[in-house]
Image (tube, rainbow, N blue to C red):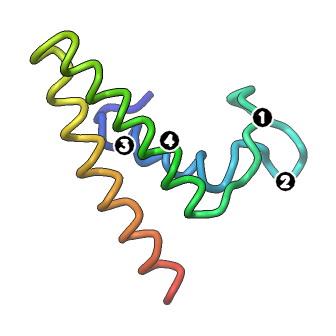
Amino acid sequence: MYPLQSELFEQFVYDLEFGTILEDISDPLELWWPPRRINVAHDNLYHVNIFTDWLYDSYLEKTAVMNMRLKQTFCITLKSKRQNQNT
C-alpha cells in the first residue's frame, strides 16, 4: 500500500492532524481519529520519537533507521503543509 516508509509516515502525519473520518462520516481505516491542532499533532509525534529512541536504546541498531526517518520526514512534512496552507 505504501511503497516507501516516508509515504507511510506522511500519511500518518496527515491523518494525525486532519483525522481519519471522512465528510460522509465514514472511516475506511476504522481508526476514528478526530482532527487535531498542529501543536497537538506535533506533541504526539514528539512522543513517537521518544518511543523510537527508547526502542533504539533497548534494541541497538534495529530501529535506528526508522527513528532517523521519522524525525526527518516529520520536519519535511510539516514544512510542506505550512507552505501549501500559505498559498
Q: Depth check: 64 or 4 in front? A: 64
Q: Amino acid at mark 2?
A: Glu
Q: Which residue occupies 42% across, 48% down?
A: 10
Q: Which mark is residue 32?
A: 1
Amino acid, disc 1: Trp
* Lower position in the chain sequence, tag 1 or tag 2: 2
Badge 2 element = loop
Tell which circle, 2 or 4, labels the residue nearer the N-terminal end: 4
Q: Which quadrant of the figure has residue 3?
A: top left
Q: Nearer the viewer, mark 1 or mark 2?
A: 1
Q: Which residue is mark 2?
A: 23
Secondary element under disc 4, as helix, strand or loop, is helix
Task: Write the residue at 26% across / 29% down.
Answer: 53
In the picture shown, does residue 74 fall above or below 38?
Answer: above
Q: Which residue is mark 4?
A: 12
Q: Earlier in the sequence, mark 3 or mark 4?
A: 3
Q: Disc 3, disc 2: CB below 8 Å?
A: no
Q: What's the residue at 12%, 14% (across, down)? A: 60
Residue 24 in percent (x, y) is at: 89, 48
Q: Position of residue 65 (x, y in %)?
A: 15, 30
Residue drawn at point x = 71 percent, y = 29 percent: 31
Q: Name the residue that disc number 3 marks.
A: 7
**In the visual, does 77 lie left or right of 4?**
right
Q: Are marks 1 and 4 in contact (CB under 8 Å)?
A: no
Whole-number angstrom distance, CA of label 1 to CA of label 4: 13 Å
Mark toward the start of the polypeptide (3 vs 2):
3
